[in-house]
Image: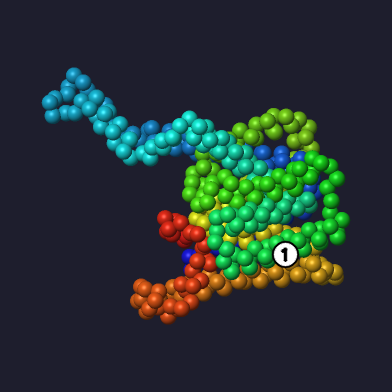
């Protein structure tokens, strides 16, 4: 049940984020403005950064207070006592062996790594903004970029199997139907700034995360790179908050009640960063198809909740709902089938797939489940 549990965890995290943001937006129409969402996202990054800074500061202080290595007295040392210089040299040598030392080939490689850290940090900041449900369908455009990135990744890095092609066709079909439905409902952004902020940027960010442009084929150091780039994400907040006049903050938060303050400043930041962490882990563990499916399902669910009504249901919305239900059911049944096969093999005490009760079914379909998977990451498939 590990694969199904991980898939369900991804779906629950993004579903909770969508539910909370829907409750926030419906109760506060001021959050429909893209500029206001940028300010709120910047404030959320600032709050999370302050919390992490406070945590690491307290941790560093406690580590200093609990150091149990007293210094030796030079005048009272005997022949059997190790000198301070010898002890320091021993600690340095052990530290060099214990730590993972990264050596760059040349200065150009170091500059490339630093530049990538800055790019990932900026993308983290923009992702906090893109994981928003508003009337401008920002999260849907992010899912569009995720699907485009998945198609690019499938063409360049992944072996095209029947399962990958089937899901890719279903994703494209849902996106086309959604854009047709939005056009039929008169959805349009008139200003170039809104088009750039609400459509182009989310598509680029979603495509950059999934396509492998930032971390390559295996996304081996995705989580570590995001951790290193988080200070850059916090630095991106400074110019936005500094340039915003106080009257704008007063106008925005003057329309909030206590419930909105709790949701916007506490619950939503936690769920946003949990969603980003789930995204990073899914990319690093090669579960790209799962995270694409979850993001697309969540984005479609947010739009369908606004479009479906008991009195009038368009055929486009109904078709999209059926397609989303089909590929969620397919993925769930696939994981249940795999878990049932593994349980059957464990019950019979058989270690070889050729002697198991699914000898002619597991091996042909195994590449379709996790195409081009890194064997070093097989132990991480149980994680999210």
Q: Where does label 1 land, which residue? A: 173
Display colour scheme:
rainbow
On screen, residue 354 above or below 222: below
Whether residue 97 appears in this view of the structure is yes
Q: Position of residue 308 (x, y in %)?
A: 79, 66
Nearest to the observer: residue 159 or residue 145? 159
Residue 148: which quarter of the image?
Answer: bottom right
Q: Residues within 10 Å of mark 1 (few under 14, many from 20)?
A: some
The furthest residue to the left? 79
Query: Quick one: SS at disc 1?
Result: helix
Whether residue 132 appears in this view of the structure is no
On screen, residue 316 above or below 108: below
The furthest residue to the top? 75
Nearest to the observer: residue 206 or residue 66? 206
Q: Residue at x 49, y 44 (%)?
A: 224
Q: Is residue 383 left or right of residue 264?
A: left
Q: Residue at x 87, y 56 (%)?
A: 186
Q: Is residue 268 left or right of residue 250?
A: left
Q: Position of residue 147 (x, y in %)?
A: 66, 57
Q: Position of residue 253 (x, y in %)?
A: 75, 40
Q: Residue at x 24, y 29 (%)?
A: 87
Q: Residue at x 83, y 68 (%)?
A: 314
On screen, residue 161 above or below 46: below
């Amino acid at each position: 049940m590990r694969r199904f549990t991980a898939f369900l965890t991804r779906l629950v995290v993004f579903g909770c984020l969508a539910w909370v943001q829907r409750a926030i937006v419906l109760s506060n129409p001021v959050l429909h403005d893209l500029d206001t969402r940028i300010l709120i996202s910047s404030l959320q990054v600032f709050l999370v950064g302050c919390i992490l800074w406070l945590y690491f500061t307290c941790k560093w202080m406690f580590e200093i207070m609990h150091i149990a290595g007293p210094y030796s007295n030079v005048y009272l040392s005997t022949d059997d006592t190790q000198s301070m210089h010898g002890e320091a040299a021993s600690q340095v040598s052990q530290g060099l062996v214990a730590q993972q030392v990264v050596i760059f080939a040349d200065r150009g490689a170091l500059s490339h790594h630093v530049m990538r850290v800055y790019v990932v940090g900026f993308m983290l900041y923009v992702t906090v903004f893109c994981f928003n449900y508003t009337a401008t369908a920002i999260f849907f455009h992010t899912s569009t970029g995720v699907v485009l990135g998945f198609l690019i990744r499938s063409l360049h890095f992944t072996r095209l199997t029947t399962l990958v092609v089937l899901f890719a066709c279903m994703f494209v079909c849902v996106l086309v139907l959604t854009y047709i439905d939005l056009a039929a409902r008169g959805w349009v952004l008139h200003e170039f700034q809104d088009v750039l902020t609400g459509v182009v940027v989310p598509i680029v960010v979603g495509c950059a995360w999934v396509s492998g442009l930032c971390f390559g084929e295996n996304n081996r150091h995705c989580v570590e790179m995001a951790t290193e780039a988080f200070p850059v994400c916090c630095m991106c907040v400074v110019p936005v908050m500094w340039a915003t006049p106080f009257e704008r903050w007063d106008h925005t938060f003057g329309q909030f009640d206590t419930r909105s303050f709790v949701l916007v400043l506490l619950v939503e930041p936690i769920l946003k960063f949990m969603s980003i962490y789930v995204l990073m882990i899914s990319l690093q563990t090669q579960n790209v198809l799962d995270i694409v499916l979850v993001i697309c399902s969540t984005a479609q669910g947010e739009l369908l909740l606004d479009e479906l009504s008991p009195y009038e249901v368009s055929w486009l919305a109904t078709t999209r709902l059926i397609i989303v239900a089909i590929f969620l059911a397919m993925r769930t049944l696939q994981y249940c089938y795999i878990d049932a096969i593994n349980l059957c093999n464990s019950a019979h005490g058989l270690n070889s797939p050729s002697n198991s009760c699914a000898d002619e079914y597991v091996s042909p379909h195994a590449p379709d489940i996790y195409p081009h998977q890194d064997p070093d990451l097989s132990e991480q498939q149980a994680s999210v």
